[in-house]
Amino acid sequence: NQRTFIVISKGKDIFRFSATNAMWILDPFNPIRRVAIYILVHQLFSLFIITTILVNCILMIMPTTPTVESTEVIFTGIYTFESAVKVMARGFILQPFTYLRDAWNWLDFVVIALAYVTMGIDLGNLAALRTFRVLRALKTVAIVPGLKTIVGAVIESVKNLRDVIILTMFSLSVFALMGLQIYMGVLTQKCIKQFPMDGSWGALTDENWERFVKNDSNWFGSENAYPLCGNSSGAGGCDEGYICLQGYGKNPDYGYTSFDSFGWAFLSAFRLMTQDFWENLYQQV
């Protein structure tokens, strides 16, 4: 019962549109909508957008300069024009085959919205929103029909692997829980000098003790290269005058390698499964 019509481009690509009014005012025979449809299905329009995306990606990998930043206005204007053409040709969201009924156009909408949010505004700590510009590269998937078919096939393949993925996640969770119970806090163990009894740090009180052991000048090793230690047999021991204590300083690899929480333990288990520099983690534990 859906009122639709199709347009076949010169490249033999088939485009389906809703026969209802686009934006409530543009019927299928409206000159504005007909021009928008003509532009949308034309091969040169797709080629122009793909070229724009490629140039945009090249500029994004270049050092940030005022000239490069000024081009963002141009690219945002082109992407806005592309979305406006799609909305006038298809409609916005209410009917089937409209702009936001295609999940790939959600990406377009988000990218353009973030571009306007970040444009000309001092975001301060929210400047990380600019990193979402890299999503523009994915716009090529929505433009090239062949790429969209391939990506759709990959997504369907992943859906068929859901049972395998669930089993893998469950197995990793078991090993992550084992690592959490066995190695929690182990990777923060360091060789720390024994508290001096000559009075240089005051009397042996809890306050002075904490102040002493938290001072990294009393740790064995150089800055950011403190060797791990252990108190069990077979573990790396400390030199004379040092004791092995746990819970001081960051975990190795800038804090990314640890078993102190389920999330970090899961990441470490995943790292071992994929054999991503696994021998270093093996030596650490």
Image: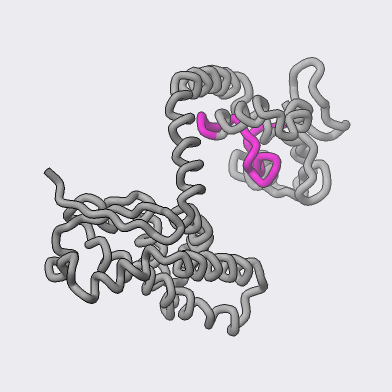
- Answer with the quarter of the image where residue 185 lies: top right
One can see residue 120 in this view: yes
* Front in this rendered view, residue 227 or 240: 227
Please identify the residue farthest to the top as the structure is shown.
Answer: 233
Q: Residue at x 18, y 72 (%)?
A: 30
Q: Is residue 95 above or below residue 258?
A: below
Is 259 a magenta residue?
yes
Front in this rendered view, residue 1 or 217 = 1
Q: Look at the image and tell me in which quarter the N terminus lies.
A: top left
Residue at the location (67% across, 35% down)? 188
The range drawn in magenta is: 244-263
- Percent x, y for residue 142? 44, 54
Q: Is residue 79 above or below residue 15?
A: below
Q: Is residue 254 magenta?
A: yes
Residue at 20% across / 55% down in the picture? Answer: 18
Residue furthest to the right in view is 240
Closer to the camera in the image, 207 or 12? 12
Q: Is residue 262 left or right of residue 58?
A: left
Q: Going by the image, does 258 lie left or right of 85?
A: right
Q: Position of residue 252 (x, y in %)?
A: 70, 40
Q: Quadrant of residue 143?
A: bottom left
Is 177 rendered above or below residue 100? above
User: Residue 216 at x, y = what percent?
Assistant: 73, 48
- Seen in the picture, residue 42 relative to 148 is either above or below; the reply is below
Question: Does residue 152 appear to the left or right of 268 in the view shown?
Answer: left
Residue 129 coordinates in the image, percent (x, y): 46, 63
Q: Is residue 197 visible?
A: no
Q: Residue at x 35, y 56 (%)?
A: 8
**Magenta: predominant secondary structure element?**
loop
Quadrant location of the C terminus in the rendered image? top right
